[in-house]
Amino acid sequence: MRRRLSRVATRLKQFLDTGNLFRFLVALILAFALWAWVTSEQDPEISRLLPAVPVTAVNVQPGLSVVGTLGTVEISLQGPRSRINALEEGDVRATVNLGDIQEPGLYQVEVKVQTPPGVRVRRVVPDTVTVQLEPESAARPSPPRPVG
């Protein structure tokens, strides 16, 4: 056992003394670089622009309603080509969270974007929208009553 341990120590010392460690590290770095290049070539990163994604309101408090539409935003996405090309309508959603707003009024609210896994949002234009909230009864006209 002792003899075997001594032999291993001697071989390790020879490995370190002859420059093999340097060659090993260079080979390891080159192998990693080659792996990274091949991986990126098989499914490279690409960008895609979605020019008119409608903004929807979520978590509107009871008794309040949104007046009019919230418009659209332009969203720039980035991700692997396979994920970006597989996007379908409805996979990317632009929303404004109105859960913290308790009173009627005019508010500037940040647009949040939900995307599938692996797809990143690069830019949202505009990044905020103006939201007008009114009491629910004021926002909807009452139905006409029959005369007679």
Image: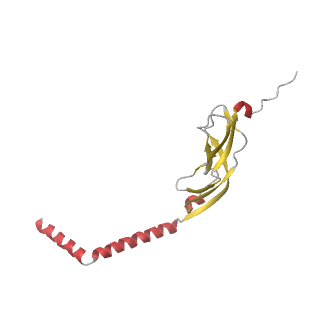
**Towards the viewer: 18 or 83:** 18
Say which residue appears at 64% left-offset and 59% top-offset: 49
Q: Residue furthest right?
A: 148
User: The N terminus is located in which quarter?
Assistant: bottom left
- Percent position of residue 15, x then y: 24, 74
Q: Residue furthest bottom?
A: 18
Which of these two is toward me, 135 or 118?
Answer: 135
Asked if residue 128 is positioned above or below residue 7 in the image, the reply reads: above
Residue 18 in percent (x, y) is at 25, 78
Instruction: Work out whether residue 22 or residue 9 is closer to the camera in this orientation and state it.
Output: 22
Q: Quadrant of the C terminus?
A: top right
User: Viewed as shown, does residue 83 lie left or right of 33?
Assistant: right
Q: Residue furthest top?
A: 148
Left or right, residue 131 beside residue 115? right
Quarter of the image where one finds residue 144:
top right
Residue 4, relative to residue 111: is it above or below? below
| Residue depicted at 72% across the width and 39% down the height | 67
Q: Residue 53, image x and y in percent?
A: 66, 52
Q: Quadrant of residue 85?
A: bottom right
> Position of 106 compared to 34: left or right?
right
- Which is more toward the observer, 148 or 60? 60
Tell me the residue at 85%/25% (across/down): 146
At 60% from the left and 38% from the top, the residue drawn is: 59
Q: Give the percent coordinates (x, y) of residue 21.
A: 28, 73
In this view, 32 is above or below 127: below
- Indicate the quadrant where residue 104 lies: top right
